[in-house]
Amino acid sequence: MQFLSDNAASVHPNVWAAMRAADEADSPYDSDRISAELDDRFAQVFGREVAVLWVATGTAANCLALSAFVPPHGGVVCHREAHIEMDECGAPGFYLHGAKLLLAEGDHAKLTAGSIAEVLDAIRPDVHQVQPHAISITQASEYGCCYTPGELAKIDVLAGERGLKLHMDGARFANAVIHLGRPPAECAGPVDALSFGFVKNGAMNAEAIVFFDPTVADVVRYRRKRAGHLQSKGRFLAAQIMAMLEGDTWLHSAEAANAAARAIGDGAAGRLLHPVEANEVFVRCTAAEREALRRQGFGFYDWGPDAARFVAAWDTREDHASALGKAIATL
């Protein structure tokens, strides 16, 4: 009974079917018929004109998106626990040719306009210090918590006042949309670029970068090629993305994952370190208690010396999730 990561989940059957259907001769790179449909399909999702580029990983999606806004001498404000800071092996510095991450605080791995302003206000506006060019937030956050449209609006006001671009790491964007119960456009807020995650939600190896100013994508097309992410058979990535969007599979998958996480969270109510709003559950438990859970057949990651992280996925079995919730409740 595995709760290690939604990255370990199986590929959705609809995705396999779409890749099989795409297995016929077509134009290479991103000139195929499926890739050509992505802009219009995402425009339907967000209700406005967008430009969309596929890539194979969330790290590439985040860093290529930020590269459009941040020069090598610039900086990106992000949370101290942000994926781009903690889990991308310095990739932002690599893709942005040395740009710096400017770390801010916030409960549940969420930034606030106030915590961002604290970082910005400490920077002298002179050539001797790295100047901020963008803000990066994660929806849902690294601790599985969601920004409300109101919270996003306050950050946007600050970004506008300070002349900063706004990027959203949406590795679990679908889970946030389900939790918030709002249209995708409201869950993304007024961001300039969104790394729209599909791999954690049922795809095999396809993510999307959504640019809300389509002209920005023209520059990133070259950077994607230079970074080695322009795949020659890109139709297979485009097919995965279209399959997830078709019939709202991306939302149904996220709904199943969120429901499984709630079942776990219900059993861990007195031990929760963060609210369960998406598909991650962070639980306070000792090393001995974690070993007891593993002896019962549950797989998960330790999260520091006194905590554990459990991640539900689109294919998590209901009986496994409820069994874990009960096991935690009886520790």
Image: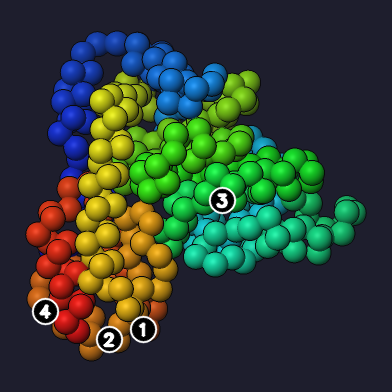
Q: Does 2 sit above or below residue 315?
A: below
Kindly state the secondary structure of the residue where label 1 is placed: loop
The numbered disc on residue 306 is 1
- Farthest residue toward the right? 126
Looking at the rendered structure, the kind of residue marked 3 is Ile
85 or 282: nearer the eye? 282
Kindly state the secondary structure of the residue where label 3 is placed: strand
Query: In the rendered structure, which disc, 4 or 3, sits on the residue that comes first in sequence?
Result: 3
Circle 2 packing at 10 Å, graded few (<14), some (14-19), many (20+), is some
Tell me the distance, in whole angstroms, between the alpha carbons under discs 2 and 4: 12 Å
Tell me the distance, in whole angstroms, between the alpha carbons under discs 1 and 4: 18 Å
Q: Report which residue position mark 4 lands on.
A: 295
89 or 17: nearer the eye? 17
Q: Residue at x 55, y 29 (%)?
A: 211
324 or 10: nearer the eye? 324
Q: Residue at x 12, y 54 (%)?
A: 317
Looking at the rendered structure, the kind of residue marked 1 is Asp
Kindly state the secondary structure of the residue where label 4 is placed: helix
Q: Quadrant of residue 277?
A: bottom left
Q: Report which residue position mark 2 lands on.
A: 287
Tell me the distance, in whole angstroms, between the alpha carbons under discs 3 and 1: 27 Å
Residue 144 is left or right of residue 74, and the answer is left
Kindly state the secondary structure of the residue where label 2 is placed: helix
Image coordinates of residue 258 in percent, x first then y, are 29, 52
Q: Quadrant of residue 182?
A: top left
Looking at the rendered structure, the kind of residue marked 2 is Ala
